[in-house]
Image (cartoon, rainbow, N blue to C red):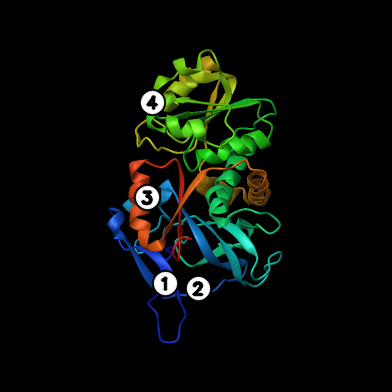
Amino acid sequence: MHNASRSALTRGEQAMKAVQATRFGEPAVLEVIELPDPAPRPGEIAIDVTHAAVGLIDLFFREGRFKDRPGMPQPPFIPGLEVAGTVRALGDGVRGFEIGEKVVSMSNGGVGGYASVFIAQAPHAVSLEGHDIDPALAVSVVPNAAMAHVALTRVAHLVEGESVLIHGALGGFSAAFPGMAKQLGAGRVVGTVRASKLQAAATTKLPYDKIVDSAELPAALGEERFDVVIDPVGGEVRSQSLDLMRPGGRLIAAGNASGDWGHSVETNRLWFGSVAVMGFNAGAYLPTHPDTVRPALEAAVQAVAAGLGQTEVDVLSFSEAVTAHQRMASRSLNGRIVLTPGEPA
């Protein structure tokens, strides 16, 4: 993963606005700066960014949690994995896109999104033309819905009619799963949230059949058991999930919002329950399975266009990036935050 910083401006260069992590640390390390406009190389497209999504992984990178792992970003870098905007320029060899076309894209390097110009690998971008999708919603849902498609089809191998349990049901990543699961034919989709989110859960437009208090597991679900469990929470919730699965069930470990980095699973529980635990990390999976990206993005756009991803979205300006990260850290969100280079409408 390369750093998403550029050299200082020289006379005559056009400037893009960007939010840069100047060092590892608290949200205050984020600063709005100007950098030279980047140009696409062969196989890339340049995007004039209208919206960039803020994700939990951005906070982890900013804090330096993965700084000692090979390929992780080092300061100064521009956070951000997902952007929406219009095509600005095409690199050599790129086909299938036109200048000015509305697109949404995810990063193949995990950084670079909090900028007014973003360089994307062409296979990691998808057109929004022909669909009446708000770009703030598109960047909030389409990339995560694409990852949900990959996780459900290629890792969990979801079969039509199966039941799905999704922890952290209103979170940015989790919120993409119910719509994609329904689109793929899931028979029943249930979510869990912490008690403070129950009121928001009662009014959500996401296509859950039921949402329960995670603190009340397993009693809150009675005798109901699931074929697939999506768990971006980890910790005790992950352990409890093993008792909520049917024989043959698959639990997808897809994050660690709990912060319990020492959690482990007893393999004998997997044996006795005849269940499986599999990890899904897009940064590790997609580079070795590039054929999954295009169909997943196209399926995601179709799901959002069909109204299956109606999550709450708050739009803030680049100048409010510190506030955005503070709100993310507080877990006070019921949806997603996106940043815009200008002032929100």
Secondary structure of the residue carrying tag 2 is loop
Q: Are marks 1 and 2 in contact (CB under 8 Å)?
A: yes
Q: Residue at x 59, y 34 (%)?
A: 207
Q: Nearer the viewer, mark 1 or mark 3?
A: 3
Q: Which of pointers 1 and 2 lies earlier in the amino acid sequence?
A: 1
Tell me the CA gap for discs 1 and 3: 21 Å
Q: Quadrant of residue 34?
A: bottom left
Work out whether 274 lies above or below 22: above
Tell me the CA gap for discs 3 and 2: 24 Å
Q: Which of pointers 4 and 1 lies earlier in the amino acid sequence?
A: 1
Work out whether 109 lies above or below 149: below
Q: Position of residue 300 (x, y in %)?
A: 64, 46
Disc 4 designates what residue? 236
Tell me the CA gap for discs 4 and 2: 44 Å
Q: Are marks 3 and 2 in contact (CB under 8 Å)?
A: no
Disc 1 designates what residue? 6
Q: Position of residue 307 (x, y in %)?
A: 63, 43
Would residue 64 be visible to someone looking at this image? no
Mark 2, other Cα within 10 Å: few <14 / some 14–19 / many ≥20: some
At label 2, the amino acid type is: Pro
Q: Which mark is residue 345?
A: none
Q: Which of pointers 4 and 2 lies earlier in the amino acid sequence?
A: 2
Disc 2 designates what residue? 38
Secondary structure of the residue carrying tag 4 is helix
Compared across the picture, whether 280 is left or right of 187 comes to: left
Q: Position of residue 41 (x, y in %)?
A: 58, 71
Q: Residue at x 55, y 16 (%)?
A: 224
Work out whether 20 lies above or below 203: below
Q: Which of pointers 1 and 3 lies earlier in the amino acid sequence?
A: 1
Disc 3 designates what residue? 59
